[in-house]
Image: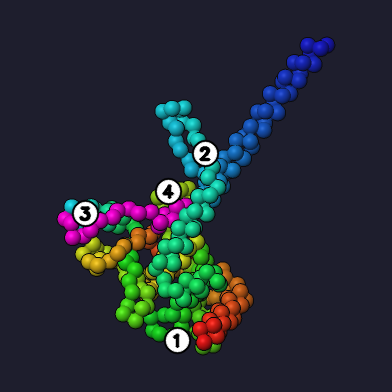
Amino acid sequence: MLLGLATAALVLGALVWELSRPRLTAGVARARTRAREHGLFSVRDLRGTRGSALELDYDPGRERRAEQRARELLRSCVNEREWAMYRDLGFLRVYGRAGERYAYLIYPHKPIVSYVPCTGALLSEYCVAFPDHSRPYGSARLPASDDVLAKWMALRADERRLIADANMHLPGRQVDPERVRRDLQRLARWERERITCAA
Amino acid sequence: MKPGHGEIVLAEGDVEVAEEERALIEAFRRELDAGMWAAVPTQTTDGRREAELVKSFAEVPRDAERVIFFPRAAGGSR
């Protein structure tokens, strides 16, 4: 009787393991992929030491240090006013090559938004990315401030080329127009305060 | 600029020293061959900050302090 119950329990355990194994394996693989895409782990192939096992080195500070370096680089490239704008408001405003008739708002990891400064009318969204396909650290995305600097450099150096490479959409496709209008109001207020402070 | 890392110094040297210039040219070519864009931050006489995209080492101003390489722009989400 006892032997029969023990055998039945063993068979049941083996069946449950066989049924749940694919889901467990897929879950672990998904978690690893997610971690890699968010740059939380570096993946080191240990082939030759322990077969093809992968060792995951967790470094929670890497993204933060990368962003810190990126902010310093951005600060060294743009002028003091633009740096203060990015530091205080979280975006950059760049006038077009044709003068102050139109301008762009550069957000990190969001489309560039063009608008008319004198009316505040939104013109277009330009979706552009700078993917590094070598994916050296598990993610193709640059740190946020590097993304802003890349857009700034590309716009300053060759506006037409960047706009030609981008996917153009009407305003509101990815960036909420209300948010942009609020940002333009914040920008106007920020500029007034700076003028007041300077006076 | 590198994802997950930010700024990395690839090469440093003086363009007036032949050996160092050669090393700089090699590093420059390597990055361009890898599909990166090269930009030189500049400053106009009235203090405006600008950037210049360069396609060859010869286009880099001799007095440039640095060249920044970043991934080539591509259209984002459709």
Q: Are marks 2 and 4 in contact (CB under 8 Å)?
A: no
Residue at mark 4 to residue at mark 1: CA–CA distance? 40 Å
Q: Nearer the viewer, residue A18 or A95?
A: A95
Residue at mark 1 to residue at mark 2: CA–CA distance? 51 Å
Mark 3: which amino acid? Glu
Whether residue A37 is visible, yes or no, is: no
N-terminal-most mark, 4 or 1:
1
Give the crowd class for mark 1: few <14, some 14-19, many >=20 residues within 10 Å: few
Q: Identify residue for label 4.
A: A136
Q: Residue at image x 37%, y 78%?
A: B48
Instruction: Provide residue A173's location: percent of width, then percent of height.
Output: 56, 71
Instruction: State the scheme by which the image is colored.
Output: rainbow
Q: Does dot 2 land on a helix, a strand or a loop?
A: strand
A142 left or right, relative to B15: right
Q: Does dot 3 land on a helix, a strand or a loop?
A: helix
Q: Identify residue for label 2.
A: A56
Between disc 3 and disc 2, the foreground one is 3
The part of the image, by quadrant, that contains residue B56 is bottom left
The magenta segment: B1-18
Residue at mark 3 to residue at mark 2: CA–CA distance? 38 Å
Give the crowd class for mark 2: few <14, some 14-19, many >=20 residues within 10 Å: some
Q: Chain of mark 4?
A: A
Between disc 1 and disc 2, the foreground one is 2
Residue at mark 1 to residue at mark 3: CA–CA distance? 45 Å
Could you tell me what secondary structure mostly forms the magenta stretch?
Answer: loop
Q: Identify residue for label 1.
A: A101
The label number, if any, that marks residue B20 in the structure image:
3
Quarter of the picture holding the N terminus of chain A: top right
Give the crowd class for mark 4: few <14, some 14-19, many >=20 residues within 10 Å: some
Up the image or down, B74 lies above or below A38; here it is below
Mark 1: which amino acid? Arg
Q: Chain of mark 1?
A: A
